[in-house]
Protein backbone atom coordinates (compact mmCIF):
# COMPACT_ATOMS: atom_id res chain seq x y z
CA UNK A 1 0.00 0.00 0.00
CA UNK A 2 1.23 3.46 -0.85
CA UNK A 3 1.33 4.65 2.74
CA UNK A 4 3.94 2.09 3.78
CA UNK A 5 6.49 3.32 1.23
CA UNK A 6 7.23 6.39 3.31
CA UNK A 7 8.39 6.75 6.90
CA UNK A 8 5.44 7.37 9.19
CA UNK A 9 5.80 11.11 9.76
CA UNK A 10 3.68 14.25 9.75
CA UNK A 11 6.56 15.83 7.81
CA UNK A 12 5.32 14.00 4.69
CA UNK A 13 2.55 16.62 4.54
CA UNK A 14 5.09 19.41 3.95
CA UNK A 15 5.13 22.57 6.02
CA UNK A 16 3.15 25.76 6.53
CA UNK A 17 4.06 28.95 8.39
CA UNK A 18 2.11 30.71 11.13
CA UNK A 19 3.77 34.08 11.70
CA UNK A 20 7.41 33.08 12.24
CA UNK A 21 6.57 29.48 13.20
CA UNK A 22 6.97 26.76 10.59
CA UNK A 23 5.15 23.50 11.34
CA UNK A 24 4.35 20.28 9.55
CA UNK A 25 1.07 20.56 7.66
CA UNK A 26 -0.64 17.78 9.62
CA UNK A 27 -1.35 18.57 13.25
CA UNK A 28 -3.19 16.94 16.15
CA UNK A 29 -6.51 18.06 17.63
CA UNK A 30 -6.45 17.47 21.39
CA UNK A 31 -10.19 17.88 22.02
CA UNK A 32 -10.68 14.09 22.03
CA UNK A 33 -8.40 13.39 25.00
CA UNK A 34 -11.27 14.31 27.33
CA UNK A 35 -14.44 12.57 28.51
CA UNK A 36 -17.78 12.03 26.78
CA UNK A 37 -19.26 15.33 25.57
CA UNK A 38 -15.74 16.87 25.81
CA UNK A 39 -16.34 16.86 29.56
CA UNK A 40 -14.06 15.60 32.32
CA UNK A 41 -11.26 13.04 32.20
CA UNK A 42 -10.80 10.70 29.23
CA UNK A 43 -11.90 7.08 29.72
CA UNK A 44 -8.31 5.90 29.35
CA UNK A 45 -5.89 8.52 30.66
CA UNK A 46 -2.78 6.40 30.00
CA UNK A 47 -3.79 5.92 26.36
CA UNK A 48 -4.50 9.66 26.02
CA UNK A 49 -0.96 10.38 27.24
CA UNK A 50 0.46 7.80 24.84
CA UNK A 51 -1.39 9.53 21.98
CA UNK A 52 0.29 12.84 22.84
CA UNK A 53 3.75 11.27 23.10
CA UNK A 54 3.32 9.33 19.87
CA UNK A 55 2.08 12.42 18.02
CA UNK A 56 5.27 14.29 18.87
CA UNK A 57 7.36 11.21 18.06
CA UNK A 58 5.73 11.15 14.61
CA UNK A 59 6.79 14.78 14.00
CA UNK A 60 3.48 16.43 14.76
CA UNK A 61 4.58 19.91 15.85
CA UNK A 62 1.23 21.70 15.97
CA UNK A 63 -1.16 20.60 18.71
CA UNK A 64 -4.53 22.32 18.87
CA UNK A 65 -6.33 22.60 22.20
CA UNK A 66 -8.53 25.00 24.23
CA UNK A 67 -9.15 25.89 27.86
CA UNK A 68 -12.73 24.68 27.34
CA UNK A 69 -11.80 21.08 26.38
CA UNK A 70 -12.68 19.17 29.53
CA UNK A 71 -12.65 22.07 30.58
CA UNK A 72 -8.95 22.30 31.46
CA UNK A 73 -8.38 18.55 31.02
CA UNK A 74 -6.85 18.65 27.53
CA UNK A 75 -4.39 21.44 28.37
CA UNK A 76 -3.50 19.86 31.71
CA UNK A 77 -2.72 16.50 30.10
CA UNK A 78 -0.59 18.23 27.45
CA UNK A 79 1.38 20.07 30.14
CA UNK A 80 1.77 16.95 32.31
CA UNK A 81 2.81 14.72 29.41
CA UNK A 82 4.83 16.83 27.02
CA UNK A 83 6.49 19.50 29.16
CA UNK A 84 9.38 20.33 28.80
CA UNK A 85 8.35 20.69 25.18
CA UNK A 86 10.41 19.44 22.27
CA UNK A 87 11.95 22.47 20.50
CA UNK A 88 9.69 23.60 17.67
CA UNK A 89 6.50 22.15 19.15
CA UNK A 90 3.71 24.71 18.81
CA UNK A 91 0.72 24.49 21.14
CA UNK A 92 -2.18 26.47 19.71
CA UNK A 93 -4.82 27.01 22.36
CA UNK A 94 -8.03 29.04 22.44
CA UNK A 95 -10.30 31.03 24.72
CA UNK A 96 -13.85 32.31 24.36
CA UNK A 97 -16.16 29.57 25.65
CA UNK A 98 -17.30 28.57 29.11
CA UNK A 99 -18.65 25.12 29.83
CA UNK A 100 -21.75 24.31 31.86
CA UNK A 101 -21.91 20.57 31.22
CA UNK A 102 -21.24 17.82 28.65
CA UNK A 103 -21.73 19.11 25.07
CA UNK A 104 -22.65 22.57 26.37
CA UNK A 105 -20.68 25.55 25.11
CA UNK A 106 -21.44 29.15 26.04
CA UNK A 107 -19.56 31.97 24.28
CA UNK A 108 -17.88 34.45 26.61
CA UNK A 109 -15.66 37.09 25.05
CA UNK A 110 -15.71 39.50 27.99
CA UNK A 111 -12.22 40.99 28.51
CA UNK A 112 -12.06 39.71 32.12
CA UNK A 113 -12.96 36.21 30.99
CA UNK A 114 -10.40 36.19 28.17
CA UNK A 115 -7.71 37.40 30.56
CA UNK A 116 -8.57 34.73 33.13
CA UNK A 117 -8.71 32.06 30.41
CA UNK A 118 -5.29 32.97 29.07
CA UNK A 119 -3.75 32.94 32.57
CA UNK A 120 -5.21 29.47 33.16
CA UNK A 121 -3.85 28.20 29.84
CA UNK A 122 -0.37 29.55 30.63
CA UNK A 123 -0.46 27.80 34.01
CA UNK A 124 -1.70 24.43 32.75
CA UNK A 125 0.59 24.42 29.72
CA UNK A 126 3.51 25.60 31.91
CA UNK A 127 4.36 28.42 29.52
CA UNK A 128 5.18 32.13 29.86
CA UNK A 129 3.78 32.83 26.42
CA UNK A 130 1.30 31.05 24.14
CA UNK A 131 2.69 30.59 20.61
CA UNK A 132 -0.73 30.76 18.92
CA UNK A 133 -3.75 32.00 20.92
CA UNK A 134 -7.01 31.69 19.04
CA UNK A 135 -10.25 33.54 19.73
CA UNK A 136 -12.55 30.50 19.84
CA UNK A 137 -15.62 32.26 18.35
CA UNK A 138 -17.07 35.62 17.40
CA UNK A 139 -20.47 34.77 18.85
CA UNK A 140 -20.88 36.61 22.14
CA UNK A 141 -23.71 39.11 21.53
CA UNK A 142 -22.72 41.10 24.62
CA UNK A 143 -19.21 41.94 23.38
CA UNK A 144 -18.10 43.79 20.25
CA UNK A 145 -15.71 41.71 18.19
CA UNK A 146 -13.27 44.62 18.05
CA UNK A 147 -13.17 44.67 21.86
CA UNK A 148 -12.49 40.92 22.09
CA UNK A 149 -9.69 41.15 19.51
CA UNK A 150 -8.45 44.27 21.32
CA UNK A 151 -8.14 42.26 24.54
CA UNK A 152 -5.99 39.68 22.74
CA UNK A 153 -3.90 42.50 21.23
CA UNK A 154 -3.30 43.93 24.71
CA UNK A 155 -2.21 40.52 26.04
CA UNK A 156 0.08 40.18 23.02
CA UNK A 157 1.68 43.55 23.84
CA UNK A 158 2.17 42.29 27.41
CA UNK A 159 4.21 39.39 25.97
CA UNK A 160 1.73 36.63 26.89
CA UNK A 161 0.74 35.80 23.31
CA UNK A 162 3.17 35.34 20.43
CA UNK A 163 0.64 35.11 17.59
CA UNK A 164 -3.14 35.55 17.35
CA UNK A 165 -5.45 33.17 15.49
CA UNK A 166 -9.22 33.12 15.07
CA UNK A 167 -11.83 30.38 14.95
CA UNK A 168 -15.38 30.14 13.65
CA UNK A 169 -15.04 33.44 11.79
CA UNK A 170 -16.69 34.69 8.59
CA UNK A 171 -14.72 36.51 5.89
CA UNK A 172 -16.07 39.85 7.19
CA UNK A 173 -15.11 39.02 10.79
CA UNK A 174 -11.63 37.97 9.64
CA UNK A 175 -11.27 41.27 7.85
CA UNK A 176 -12.36 43.19 10.96
CA UNK A 177 -9.88 41.25 13.12
CA UNK A 178 -7.10 41.91 10.60
CA UNK A 179 -7.75 45.64 10.79
CA UNK A 180 -6.75 45.42 14.48
CA UNK A 181 -4.08 42.68 14.72
CA UNK A 182 -1.99 40.38 12.56
CA UNK A 183 -3.99 37.12 12.29
CA UNK A 184 -1.77 34.08 11.66
CA UNK A 185 -4.39 31.31 11.42
CA UNK A 186 -8.08 30.62 10.91
CA UNK A 187 -9.81 27.53 12.30
CA UNK A 188 -13.30 26.73 10.98
CA UNK A 189 -15.33 23.58 10.52
CA UNK A 190 -14.48 22.12 7.10
CA UNK A 191 -14.50 18.62 5.66
CA UNK A 192 -15.48 16.87 2.44
CA UNK A 193 -19.16 16.86 3.40
CA UNK A 194 -19.27 20.36 4.90
CA UNK A 195 -17.67 23.06 2.80
CA UNK A 196 -19.69 25.95 4.22
CA UNK A 197 -16.41 27.72 5.01
CA UNK A 198 -15.13 27.48 1.43
CA UNK A 199 -15.13 31.30 1.08
CA UNK A 200 -13.11 31.64 4.28
CA UNK A 201 -10.63 29.05 3.02
CA UNK A 202 -10.31 30.96 -0.27
CA UNK A 203 -9.70 34.18 1.66
CA UNK A 204 -6.97 32.41 3.65
CA UNK A 205 -5.38 31.26 0.40
CA UNK A 206 -5.47 34.83 -0.94
CA UNK A 207 -3.89 36.15 2.26
CA UNK A 208 -1.42 33.25 2.77
CA UNK A 209 -2.90 32.43 6.18
CA UNK A 210 -3.00 28.75 7.27
CA UNK A 211 -6.54 27.34 7.54
CA UNK A 212 -7.09 24.67 10.21
CA UNK A 213 -10.19 22.66 9.30
CA UNK A 214 -11.86 21.34 12.44
CA UNK A 215 -13.78 18.06 12.28
CA UNK A 216 -11.64 17.21 9.21
CA UNK A 217 -12.87 13.61 9.38
CA UNK A 218 -16.46 14.70 9.92
CA UNK A 219 -16.23 14.72 13.73
CA UNK A 220 -18.90 12.51 15.26
CA UNK A 221 -20.63 12.04 11.88
CA UNK A 222 -17.98 10.21 9.90
CA UNK A 223 -19.45 9.02 6.62
CA UNK A 224 -17.77 7.34 3.69
CA UNK A 225 -19.07 8.19 0.22
CA UNK A 226 -18.73 5.93 -2.83
CA UNK A 227 -16.03 8.23 -4.15
CA UNK A 228 -14.04 7.90 -0.93
CA UNK A 229 -14.46 4.10 -0.97
CA UNK A 230 -13.25 3.91 -4.59
CA UNK A 231 -10.18 6.07 -4.04
CA UNK A 232 -9.39 4.28 -0.77
CA UNK A 233 -9.49 0.93 -2.56
CA UNK A 234 -7.08 2.18 -5.24
CA UNK A 235 -4.57 3.28 -2.58
CA UNK A 236 -5.06 0.37 -0.19
CA UNK A 237 -5.93 3.01 2.39
CA UNK A 238 -8.87 3.72 4.69
CA UNK A 239 -11.55 6.27 3.77
CA UNK A 240 -10.42 8.40 6.72
CA UNK A 241 -6.88 8.50 5.33
CA UNK A 242 -8.18 9.53 1.90
CA UNK A 243 -10.23 12.26 3.58
CA UNK A 244 -7.10 13.69 5.19
CA UNK A 245 -5.09 13.33 1.96
CA UNK A 246 -7.90 15.10 0.09
CA UNK A 247 -7.88 18.03 2.50
CA UNK A 248 -4.10 18.31 2.20
CA UNK A 249 -4.43 18.26 -1.59
CA UNK A 250 -7.20 20.88 -1.58
CA UNK A 251 -4.91 23.75 -0.59
CA UNK A 252 -1.29 24.35 0.48
CA UNK A 253 -2.75 26.56 3.26
CA UNK A 254 -4.72 23.63 4.72
CA UNK A 255 -3.44 22.34 8.08
CA UNK A 256 -5.76 19.52 9.22
CA UNK A 257 -5.91 18.74 12.95
CA UNK A 258 -7.65 15.34 13.17
CA UNK A 259 -8.50 14.40 16.74
CA UNK A 260 -8.33 11.00 18.37
CA UNK A 261 -8.01 9.33 21.76
CA UNK A 262 -6.26 6.22 20.40
CA UNK A 263 -2.69 5.61 19.27
CA UNK A 264 -3.77 3.21 16.48
CA UNK A 265 -6.06 5.90 15.02
CA UNK A 266 -3.36 8.54 15.35
CA UNK A 267 -0.88 6.38 13.43
CA UNK A 268 -3.47 5.74 10.72
CA UNK A 269 -4.16 9.46 10.42
CA UNK A 270 -0.48 10.42 10.24
CA UNK A 271 0.12 7.82 7.53
CA UNK A 272 -2.30 9.81 5.36
CA UNK A 273 0.38 12.51 5.02
CA UNK A 274 2.26 10.07 2.77
CA UNK A 275 -0.62 9.51 0.33
CA UNK A 276 -0.41 11.34 -2.97
CA UNK A 277 -3.70 11.59 -4.79
CA UNK A 278 -3.76 11.35 -8.58
CA UNK A 279 -5.69 13.74 -10.82
CA UNK A 280 -8.26 10.98 -11.28
CA UNK A 281 -8.66 10.70 -7.49
CA UNK A 282 -9.11 14.46 -7.15
CA UNK A 283 -11.73 14.53 -9.89
CA UNK A 284 -13.63 11.71 -8.26
CA UNK A 285 -13.54 13.50 -4.89
CA UNK A 286 -14.66 16.80 -6.50
CA UNK A 287 -11.63 18.55 -5.10
CA UNK A 288 -12.25 21.93 -6.61
CA UNK A 289 -12.86 25.21 -4.85
CA UNK A 290 -16.30 25.61 -6.44
CA UNK A 291 -17.98 23.18 -4.01
N1 LIG B 1 -12.58 25.58 16.84
C1 LIG B 1 -13.62 24.84 17.14
O1 LIG B 1 -14.73 25.34 17.40
C2 LIG B 1 -13.46 23.35 17.17
C3 LIG B 1 -14.59 22.50 17.25
C4 LIG B 1 -14.38 21.12 17.24
C5 LIG B 1 -13.08 20.64 17.16
N2 LIG B 1 -12.01 21.48 17.10
C6 LIG B 1 -10.61 20.97 16.99
O2 LIG B 1 -10.50 20.19 15.82
C7 LIG B 1 -10.02 18.89 16.15
C8 LIG B 1 -10.61 17.87 15.20
O3 LIG B 1 -12.02 17.85 15.29
P1 LIG B 1 -12.83 16.62 15.91
O4 LIG B 1 -11.93 15.90 16.87
O5 LIG B 1 -14.10 17.12 16.39
O6 LIG B 1 -13.18 15.75 14.66
P2 LIG B 1 -12.40 14.76 13.66
O7 LIG B 1 -10.93 14.93 13.81
O8 LIG B 1 -13.00 14.96 12.34
O9 LIG B 1 -12.87 13.33 14.16
C9 LIG B 1 -12.62 12.87 15.45
C10 LIG B 1 -13.49 11.64 15.65
O10 LIG B 1 -13.11 10.63 14.72
C11 LIG B 1 -12.59 9.49 15.42
N3 LIG B 1 -11.36 9.09 14.71
C12 LIG B 1 -10.22 9.80 14.56
N4 LIG B 1 -9.32 9.11 13.83
C13 LIG B 1 -9.91 7.94 13.51
C14 LIG B 1 -9.49 6.79 12.79
N5 LIG B 1 -8.28 6.74 12.23
N6 LIG B 1 -10.35 5.75 12.67
C15 LIG B 1 -11.59 5.79 13.23
N7 LIG B 1 -12.05 6.84 13.94
C16 LIG B 1 -11.21 7.91 14.08
C17 LIG B 1 -12.32 9.93 16.83
O11 LIG B 1 -12.60 8.89 17.72
P3 LIG B 1 -11.38 8.07 18.47
O12 LIG B 1 -11.00 8.90 19.64
O13 LIG B 1 -12.04 6.78 18.82
O14 LIG B 1 -10.30 7.92 17.47
C18 LIG B 1 -13.32 11.06 17.02
O15 LIG B 1 -14.58 10.57 17.44
C19 LIG B 1 -10.44 18.72 17.61
O16 LIG B 1 -9.73 17.67 18.25
C20 LIG B 1 -10.19 20.09 18.15
O17 LIG B 1 -8.80 20.27 18.44
C21 LIG B 1 -12.20 22.81 17.09
Image (cartoon, rainbow, N blue to C red):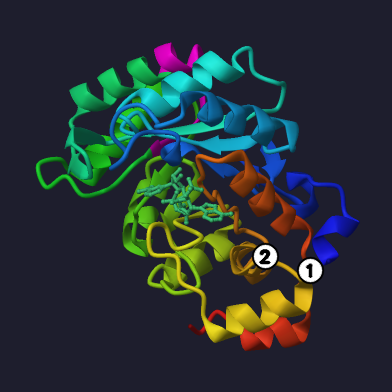
Q: Residue at x 48, y 83 (%)?
A: 291
Mark on residue 245? Answer: 2
**Could you tell me which quadrant the N terminus lies in?**
bottom right
Determine the residue positioned at 50% across, 39% down: 261
Place of residue 266 in the rendered image (x, y in percent of width and height, measured from the top left): 62, 45
Q: Is 233 or 32 nearer to us in this picture? A: 233
Q: How would you rate the neighbour count of disc 2 (Cα within 10 Å): few for under 14, some for 14-19, many for 20 or more? A: many
The one nearer the camera, 252 or 216, is: 216
Left or right: 158, with 115 as reference point: right
Q: Counting residues from the N terminus, which is met first, the one under dot 2 or under dot 1?
A: 2
The quarter of the displayed image where residue 155 is located = top left
Residue 118, above or below 39: above
Above or below, 204 relative to 86: below
- 127 or 152, which is in the foreground? 127
Residue holding disc 1: 276
Callout 2 touching callout 1 (CB < 8 Å):
yes
Position of 148 compared to 237: left or right?
left
Q: Residue 252: where, in percent of width, then height?
A: 68, 62
Rendered location of residue 42, percent (x, y):
40, 31
Amino acid sequence: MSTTQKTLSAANAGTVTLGDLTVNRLGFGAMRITGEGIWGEPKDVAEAKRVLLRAVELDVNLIDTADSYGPEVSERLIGETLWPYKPGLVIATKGGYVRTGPNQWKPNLQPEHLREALEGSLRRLKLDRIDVYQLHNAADPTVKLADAIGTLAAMQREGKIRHIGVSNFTVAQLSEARSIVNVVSVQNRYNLADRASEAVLEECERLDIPFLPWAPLGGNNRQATDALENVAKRHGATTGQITIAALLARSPMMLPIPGTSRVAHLEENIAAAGIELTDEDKRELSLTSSH
